[in-house]
Image (cartoon, rainbow, N blue to C red):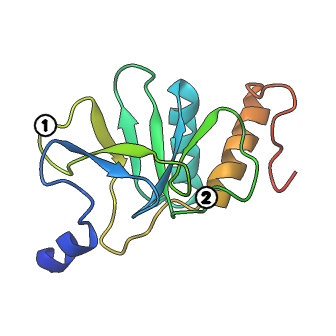
Amino acid sequence: MNTESDRANLGWVPASGHQLRMAGVHFDAVRVDGETGRDLADLMERLTGGRPGPVIAEANGRRSTYFLVPPGSTGHRPWPREAERLTGGPGRVSYVLVPALYGWTWPLSWRCVPTPDGHLVHALLLRNALAALLATVGRAAPGTVRPFGG
């Protein structure tokens, strides 16, 4: 394994602690709070054979789960209101707090670590998985987005 080239591919991951990263540069993020976010991470792991892409878990507060998706990939479809899109673009600036891969990073941790190949979470799969999860467990708000292009 070539750790020098691996670090170059993961230059947005801090060496220690946490750092804010501007959305829209290396990734955008979708934040889903609480148990719904954790359940969605479980579902995405099952759907992708354990490789959904980078996912950050928060241990306190809203207990949010952040799914890192390709920049600009969340803007072309409606999303369930349980998902907050953290994106960049004209008139919009969002930041995501990113933990280091190792060491003291509480309250954040990597649920699914980023890989040197740059693979990110597939935004459409994530959106449809969230809509299906919400519909299955009866958590969807009235008038929410239906899965698979609905």
> Is residue 33 among what the camera can see?
yes
For marks 1 and 2, the one nearer the N-term is 1
Q: Looking at the picture, does residue 100 appear above or below residue 81?
A: below
Q: Which mark is residue 69?
A: none
Which class describes the residues within 10 Å of circle 1: few (<14), some (14-19), or many (20+)? few
The residue drawn where x is 38% and y is 37% is 57
Q: Quadrant of residue 17?
A: top left
The x, y position of residue 91, in whole percent, is 55, 50
The residue drawn where x is 47% and y is 47% is 93
Quarter of the picture holding the N terminus:
bottom left
Question: Mark 1 — residue?
Answer: 104
The residue drawn where x is 38% and y is 44% is 96
Q: Is residue 149 left or right of residue 14?
A: right
Q: Amino acid at mark 2?
A: Ala
Q: Quadrant of residue 144?
A: top right
Q: Looking at the picture, does residue 8 appear above or below residue 45?
A: below
> Is residue 1 among what the camera can see?
no
* In front of the other: 114 or 85: 85
Which class describes the residues within 10 Å of circle 2: few (<14), some (14-19), or many (20+)? many
Question: Mark 2 — residue?
Answer: 123
Question: Circles 1 and 2: CB distance less than 8 Å?
Answer: no
Disc 1 element: loop
Residue farthest to the top, as pictured: 61
The x, y position of residue 62, in whole percent, is 45, 22
Disc 2 element: helix
Q: Amino acid at mark 1?
A: Trp
The residue drawn where x is 41% and y is 63% is 25
Q: Is residue 91 left or right of residue 59?
A: right
